[in-house]
Amino acid sequence: MTNQTLTTNEPVARFKDGLVEIAIWQNDTENGRPFYSTSAIQRSYKDKSGDYQVTSSLSGTQLLQAARLYQQAYDTIRELEEADYQASKAEA
């Protein structure tokens, strides 16, 4: 049994730089408190038949893009956590 359940099928935020993307997901613990997690960084590309695919493999230059996206995701999660904390204080 897990102590988390997904609260939505859509991420609360997405960050994209070129073909590199990361998403933030909100989850709830059994006591109803939210917590946030990220998907793995992924990159889009077209395969030989022209269809879009995704991979977690990054080139050297895409590593900097990924680092910047992780920083944005971190900052956003901290803001979401602070907003949740303030809302819980107001309810108490």
Image (spheres, rainbow, N blue to C red):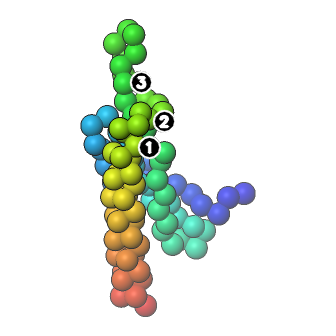
Residue 11 visible? The answer is no
Q: Which label was assigned to residue 53?
A: 3
Q: Where does the N terminus fall, quadrant-wise? A: bottom right
Q: Which label was assigned to residue 56?
A: 2
Amino acid type at circle 1 is Ile
> Which residue was labeled with disc 1?
41
Question: Which numbered mark, 3 or 1, is in the foreground of this view?
Answer: 1
Q: Tell me, yes or no, whether the two marked residues, 2 and 3, touch with CB atoms within 8 Å.
A: no
- What is the residue that sits farthest to the left in this orientation? 18
Q: Secondary structure at mark 1?
A: loop
- Dot 1: within a 10 Å radius of its alpha carbon, few (fewer than 14), some, or many (20 or more) residues? many
The residue located at (57%, 67%) in the rendering is 29
The residue located at (38%, 9%) in the rendering is 49
Camera-nearest residue between 60 and 33: 60
- What is the residue that sits farthest to the bottom in this orientation? 92
Camera-nearest residue between 45 and 8: 45
The residue located at (41%, 80%) in the rendering is 85
- Residue 15 lies, with reference to residue 75, above or below; the image says above
Q: Where does the C terminus fall, quadrant-wise? A: bottom left
- What is the residue that sits farthest to the right in this orientation? 1
- Dot 3: within a 10 Å radius of its alpha carbon, few (fewer than 14), some, or many (20 or more) residues? few
Amino acid type at circle 3 is Gln
Q: Tell me, yes or no, whether the two marked residues, 1 and 2, touch with CB atoms within 8 Å.
A: yes
Residue 63 visible? The answer is yes
- Dot 2: within a 10 Å radius of its alpha carbon, few (fewer than 14), some, or many (20 or more) residues? few
Residue 90 percent location from the top left of the image: 36, 88
Image quarter of residue 80 = bottom left
Residue 77 percent location from the top left of the image: 39, 65
Mark 3 or mark 1: name the one nearer the start of the chain: 1
Residue 62 percent location from the top left of the image: 36, 39
Q: Secondary structure at mark 3?
A: strand
